[in-house]
Image (cartoon, grey):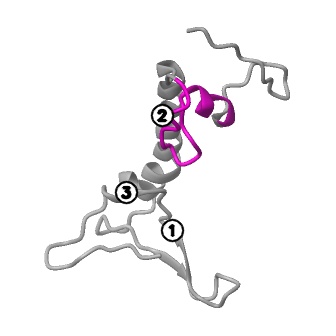
Amino acid sequence: MGEKLTEKTDSGALSVAKAVLLPMADLDQDWQRLGMREPNALADAVLRAKRAGKWSASYAEAMLNNRDAFDRIPPKINPLGAQTGRASHSDPATPGWEVRRCMVAEPGHVYFSVD
């Protein structure tokens, strides 16, 4: 597709790391279009497939494996987890709305996320 891979991994293979593919896909670190070039469709597809695989293992499978007897995903909150003295939330840590939207509240309850 006209791209030249030049970065190498530690083992000497050509790198297809996120840092290499994002510019080819014309994306910044927040996955927003840069408008600097024509996006390479293959680089974009590889990035999204790698992210989906990571999210599947890191978030979806972890949530399913940590369900309680009622199929609920209990949060784990560390009340003194942050250096500022505020609570930190550790599990299930989710990267964005794409994963969080798979969780729904029981009838009569609400689910919310705050930062």
Residue at (48% x, 38% y) in the render: 33
Query: In the drawing, does residue 36 fall left or right of residue 11?
Result: left
Depth check: 43 or 36 in front?
Answer: 36
Specify the farthest residue to the front. Answer: 36
98 shown above or below 100: above
Crowd rating for badge 2 (residues with CA inside 10 Å; few <14, some 14–19, many 20+): some
Depth check: 55 or 35 in front?
Answer: 35
Task: From the image, state whether disc 1 or disc 3 is nearer to you.
Answer: 3
Quarter occupied by the N terminus: top right
> x, y percentage for residue 91?
51, 68
Q: Secondary structure at mark 1?
A: strand
Query: In the drawing, does residue 19 fall left or right of residue 107?
Result: right
Residue at (32% x, 74% y) in the render: 112
Residue at (14% x, 79% y) in the render: 108
Q: Which residue is disc 3 drawn over? A: 97
Residue 106, quarter of picture:
bottom left
At label 3, the amino acid type is Trp
- State the CA–CA distance, disc 3 to disc 2: 15 Å
Residue 16, quarter of picture:
top right
- Predominant SS along the magenta part: loop
Q: Secondary structure at mark 2?
A: helix
> x, y percentage for residue 110?
23, 76
Crowd rating for badge 1 (residues with CA inside 10 Å; few <14, some 14–19, many 20+): some
Residue 29 within the magenta-colored segment of the rendering: yes
> x, y percentage for residue 23?
61, 31
Residue at (37% x, 68% y) in the render: 68
Q: Which residue is disc 1 drawn over? A: 91
